[in-house]
Amino acid sequence: VVDRLTADPTPTVTSSRDPAFNDESDDDAIRIEIEDISSRLNPNWVQRTFLERSSLSALGIIASMPNLVQEWRFERWFTGLSDPRLVELFSLDTVESLLSTHSYANVNTTGEIALERLYAEITGDEGAASIFRNRVQQSLQEQRMITGEELPLVLSPYSDEMSVYVTTEPQVNVNLAPDELVRAIVEYPPFEVPNASAIASNLLALRDARDVERGELRDIVGAEEGSRLYEYLGSISWFVRVTVDSGEATFRAIVARRPQAMREDDTYRIISWVRLVGDESE
């Protein structure tokens, strides 16, 4: 499976949808399905203000949903969509179609409290975690994005450990994300996209016709060069679910693209693997 995802890496770079998404096995007896599972809203990382002010606020079933998301993830991370707390906050349809706990934390779009807690848990150094949070807060106060080049310094002294989890790459592949999420990002009031509703419709129509590359999003959307919108929307899928059905057995794996890998030399790792038996797994 990994060989199929990494074979001929050049198309992976130039195509917003990985070639494997449209790939077909040469063996008619083997069926392979690959699904993007990271171009969703991650309840562990989403900022409270985005839940409050974006069009997705209507998806919460209780008025205090944004505060509870922040409070509950501080107590314990949402470890999967089967977490019963999620259906107390969102409708079941929303949980199944718009949420995912498989994504890296973009340092420019993730809640600063969540970033500090993640740093402390990974490194065991609460003092360094507090300093890290201060660096993130400073960038927010200065209304600027932390770049990939400066991220190692922002994550220091544990940049090697933390770069596995925290990145400056956009979480959402604009070509594969749910329509509602693309609209919510483009129409998010703080981004001040001119004619946002029409732009979102045009973007969704364009992606149905062809892949949209990250480099052309600025011309299509029209937001300011330094807009945080471009920290949300990109053209790379970071986590995919791969299902292989041989007719005799079905196997399912979650495969992650490494966040800091150079795009011309993408690498992947399998983070979970199961053999399915009917609706069960072993």
Image (cartoon, rainbow, N blue to C red):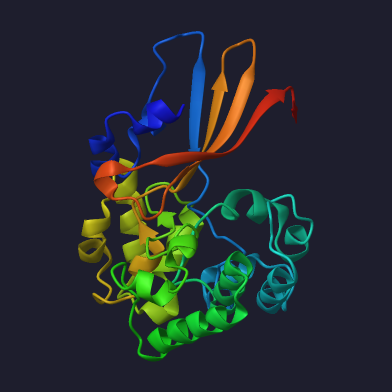
Residue 58 on image: x %, y %: 62, 69
Q: Residue at x 63, y 20 (%)?
A: 250
Q: Residue at 69% across / 63% down in the picture?
A: 77
Residue 280 locus on image (x, y percent): 76, 28
Q: Quadrant of residue 140?
A: bottom left
Q: Identify which residue is drawn at 50% across, 60% down.
A: 165
111 left or right, relative to 93: left
> What residue is drawn where x is 21% and y is 58%?
216
Return the residue nearer the eye: 215 or 105: 105
Left or right, 249 with respect to 191, comes to: right
| 158 relative position to 214: left or right | right
Q: Position of residue 103 (x, y in %)?
A: 52, 55
**Which of 112/219 is in front?**
112
The quarter of the displayed image where residue 272 is located: top right
Judge whether 154 appears above or below 181 on screen: below
In this image, 256 relative to 228: left or right? right
Q: In this view of the protein, can residue 190 be seen by the observer?
A: yes
Name the spot of residue 57 as percent of width and height, x first: 60, 71
* Res. 210 in view: no
As drawn, 5 above or below 37: above
Q: How many marks?
A: 0
Residue 96 versus residue 192 in the image, above or below: above
Which quadrant of the rendered structure holds the C terminus?
Answer: top right
In this view, which residue lies farthest toward the bottom? 141
